[in-house]
């Protein structure tokens, strides 16, 4: 092959991270950039900080943590990310800038409120099947909705598995499609069901919640609040042209995009609102659809002292009590108003009466100085004096310095459906992401994608000619070639079209065309500049153990675990059998032995000895050129070399004639002038879950 000396043009555009507006074009030198799956590929470049570049305003335009960066190769966007650091050398007058792909942003965003994916199990009472429809009755209200996927256990082979709910006919009855024959009404004694969340849906929801900074998510309880609550006393309201304006008595610290919650303002305005603008520190404006409301004066927030408290159980053995508080002056409240009670509870009475503090709706008014509400109480509490307690009521709004800040959290990552329109087919156990754990979104995505039936993901960038702006697109990629089952159960769902092909159980290895690997071919001699193979058994395994965790077991000595062995490698009939090489992995969220065995089998496939690592450098200026491939795509490698031919003839590769690998990541190094040839270091991985040995 001859070098393609087509003139290459590289341009580097810097943007405001929040608005995505272009702020500068910088002629970086000594540039290298990486693209990768499930991680953030790095960028590095330099620019002289001299009088000739003073017009570029380099100090502000390369501000770390606030600046987006896009790379255009011959007017095609090949990389996008964020500037995270820079170094200036006063001797060389050189500014070195480092960044990472946009996926890096999600390692800088934490889940600060508790999120729950899936539901707890509810007991089942009975089921029947007729004409392919199963009618299931729960022992208590199930809370399920049409279109959700439910996991059913403990019923038997006729119904155990994952199903899409086709209809909810009552609070205790729902319908699913059933592939088995008719079954008369049958009582169930051990059956349970729960809503399960597909991992694709989890990933998209997590990205969406990140972009809104968990707006609209309520805290599990007030004791989990990470900071003090702030309040604004509202003295007037109005709405005009679907914009509501409220005025406060004192200065507030609310900013545009922040979430506030309104109380006792107006039936059409109360509740959670997102601030649109703040003309001054006494005014807040937010969007509110509805008829105009004339400017109206309000009483504002009132804080009254509480002088006594009392709680009486509602009925014998009831978990609820009627709480009554007495204020030092007439309260002027009415039934249905929301109040906030503070500093009333005491842990020193011996009555476990931590029940009064919190937010409540007034249930009854017994006198001008007494307010009643429902609370949870363990014991009755007689009329008891209170010192320092307060009750807040009246027209006000509540906000906090921890969020939500939706205007500062959305960097406009576009979410798209998987290209084939299907879900991952993998449904995890109900997952609690607790706010106090402060896990980053990036960590959580990695955790979920590593599971069996998980997913790969990346953010692709492009320039939209219609909008004259850059775009950032979050893409989900399959790990398995096709999934119709999860956790050992078949998903019976209308989500899977009837013409979807069945998974192929045989025919390994797959054809080159199956992976579209014939579209990306790297060859030596040819566009491959350097090629080497590192083979090692240091971290290889012929037997893999996976240790789980059952939180109900008190000692680690009895934790569940599973092992899988590569019997084809251990078999010594030819005199070339492998010794036992053990490796162990820990999965703290898994307790089911069957699931642990599936993980062990998967990890074993990836660890078969010797583990071969290919180091491949290609000329990115030759076809396939830089920008024509992305992480997650498959490629063919043809190497005219005797060592490689012997590897192909052994049992180390699925094929005798060609190497097939998935591109995990790649790094591009660009010569300053001219820009050819571009050096591309490819990081390739074998995915044995799809491309199994078949010889």
Image (cartoon, helix red, strand yellow):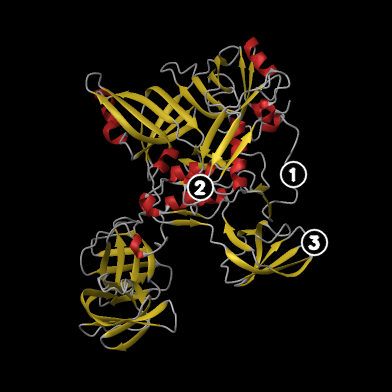
> How far apart are labels 3 and 1 at the CA level?
22 Å
Q: Which residue lies under the disc numbered 1? A: 502
Q: Earlier in the sequence, mark 3 or mark 2?
A: 3
Q: Is residue 241 left or right of residue 426?
A: left
Q: Secondary structure at mark 3?
A: loop
Q: Residue furthest top?
A: 642
Mark 2, residue position: 549
- Front position in the image: 342 or 12: 342
Compare marks 3 and 1 and give the one earlier in the sequence.
3
**Are dots 3 and 2 in contact, CB under 8 Å?**
no
Q: Which residue is mark 3?
A: 181
Q: Secondary structure at mark 1?
A: loop
Residue 77 appears anywhere in the view: no
Residue at 33% in and 40% down: 66
Residue 45, percent from left and from top: 37, 25
Q: Nearer the viewer, mark 3 or mark 2?
A: 2
State yes or no: discs 3 and 1 in contact (Cβ < 8 Å). no
Q: Residue at the spot x=56%, y=13% of the render?
A: 3
Between disc 2 and disc 1, the foreground one is: 2
**Res 275 quadrant in image:** bottom left
Q: Viewed as shown, does residue 119 lie left or right of 507?
A: left
């Amino acid at each position: 092959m001859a070098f393609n000396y087509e003139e290459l043009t590289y341009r580097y555009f810097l943007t405001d991270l929040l608005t995505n507006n272009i702020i500068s074009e910088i002629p970086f030198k000594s540039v290298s950039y990486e693209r990768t799956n499930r991680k953030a590929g790095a960028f590095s470049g330099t620019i002289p900080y001299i009088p000739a570049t003073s017009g570029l305003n380099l100090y502000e335009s390369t501000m770390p943590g606030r600046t987006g960066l896009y790379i255009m190769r011959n007017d095609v966007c090949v990389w996008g990310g964020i500037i995270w650091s820079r170094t200036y050398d006063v001797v060389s007058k050189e500014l070195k800038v480092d960044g990472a792909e946009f996926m890096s942003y999600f390692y800088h965003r934490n889940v600060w409120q508790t999120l729950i994916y899936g539901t707890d199990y509810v007991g089942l009472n009975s089921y029947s099947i007729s004409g392919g429809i199963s009618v299931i009755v729960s022992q208590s209200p199930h809370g399920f909705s049409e279109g959700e996927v439910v996991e059913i256990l403990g019923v038997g082979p006729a119904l155990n598995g994952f199903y899409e709910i086709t209809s909810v006919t009552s609070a205790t009855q729902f319908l699913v499609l059933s592939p088995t024959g008719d079954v008369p009404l049958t009582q169930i004694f051990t059956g349970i069901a729960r809503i399960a969340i597909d991992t694709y849906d989890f990933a998209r929801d997590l990205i969406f919640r990140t972009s809104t900074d968990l707006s609209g998510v309520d805290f599990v309880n007030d004791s989990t609040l990470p900071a003090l609550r702030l309040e604004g006393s509202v003295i007037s309201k109005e709405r005009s042209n679907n914009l509501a304006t409220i005025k406060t008595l004192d200065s507030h610290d609310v900013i545009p995009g922040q979430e506030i919650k309104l109380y006792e303002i107006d039936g059409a305005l109360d509740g959670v609102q997102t601030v649109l603008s703040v003309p001054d520190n006494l005014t807040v404006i937010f969007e509110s659809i509805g008829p105009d409301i004339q400017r109206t004066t309000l009483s504002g927030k009132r804080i009254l002292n509480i002088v006594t408290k009392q709680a009486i159980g509602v009925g014998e053995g009831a978990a609820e009590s009627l709480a009554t508080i007495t204020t030092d002056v007439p309260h002027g409240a009415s039934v249905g108003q929301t109040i906030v009670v503070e500093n009333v509870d005491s842990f020193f009475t011996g009555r476990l009466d931590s029940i009064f503090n919190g937010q409540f709706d007034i249930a009854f008014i017994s006198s001008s100085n007494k307010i009643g509400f429902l609370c949870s109480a363990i014991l009755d509490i007689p009329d008891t004096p209170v010192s320092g307690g307060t009750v807040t009521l009246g027209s006000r709004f509540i906000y906090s310095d921890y969020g939500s800040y939706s205007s500062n959290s959305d960097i406009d990552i576009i979410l798209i459906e998987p290209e084939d329109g299907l879900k991952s087919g993998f449904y995890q156990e109900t997952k609690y992401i607790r706010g106090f754990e402060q896990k980053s979104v990036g960590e959580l995505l990695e955790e979920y994608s590593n599971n069996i039936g998980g997913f790969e993901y990346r953010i692709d960038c492009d320039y939209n000619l219609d909008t004259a702006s850059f775009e950032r697109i979050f893409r989900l990629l399959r790990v398995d070639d096709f999934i119709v089952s999860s956790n050992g159960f078949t998903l019976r769902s209308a989500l899977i079209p009837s013409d979807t092909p069945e998974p192929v159980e045989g025919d390994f290895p797959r054809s080159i065309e199956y992976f579209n690997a014939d579209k990306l071919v790297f060859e030596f001699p040819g566009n491959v500049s350097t090629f080497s193979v590192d083979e090692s058994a240091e971290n290889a395994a012929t037997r893999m153990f996976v240790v789980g965790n059952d939180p109900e077991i008190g000692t680690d000595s009895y934790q569940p675990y599973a092992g899988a062995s590569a019997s084809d490698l251990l078999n010594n009939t030819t005199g070339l059998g492998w010794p036992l090489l053990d490796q162990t992995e820990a999965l703290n969220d898994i307790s089911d032995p069957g699931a642990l065995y599936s993980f062990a089998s998967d990890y074993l496939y990836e660890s078969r000895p010797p583990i071969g690592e290919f180091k491949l450098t290609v000329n990115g200026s030759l076809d396939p050129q830089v920008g024509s491939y992305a992480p997650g795509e498959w490629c063919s490698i043809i190497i005219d070399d005797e060592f490689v031919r012997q590897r192909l003839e052994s049992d180390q590769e699925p094929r005798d004639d060609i190497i097939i690998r998935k591109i995990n990541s790649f790094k591009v190094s660009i010569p300053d002038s001219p820009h050819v040839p571009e050096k591309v270091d490819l990081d390739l991985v074998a995915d044995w879950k799809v491309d199994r040995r078949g010889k």
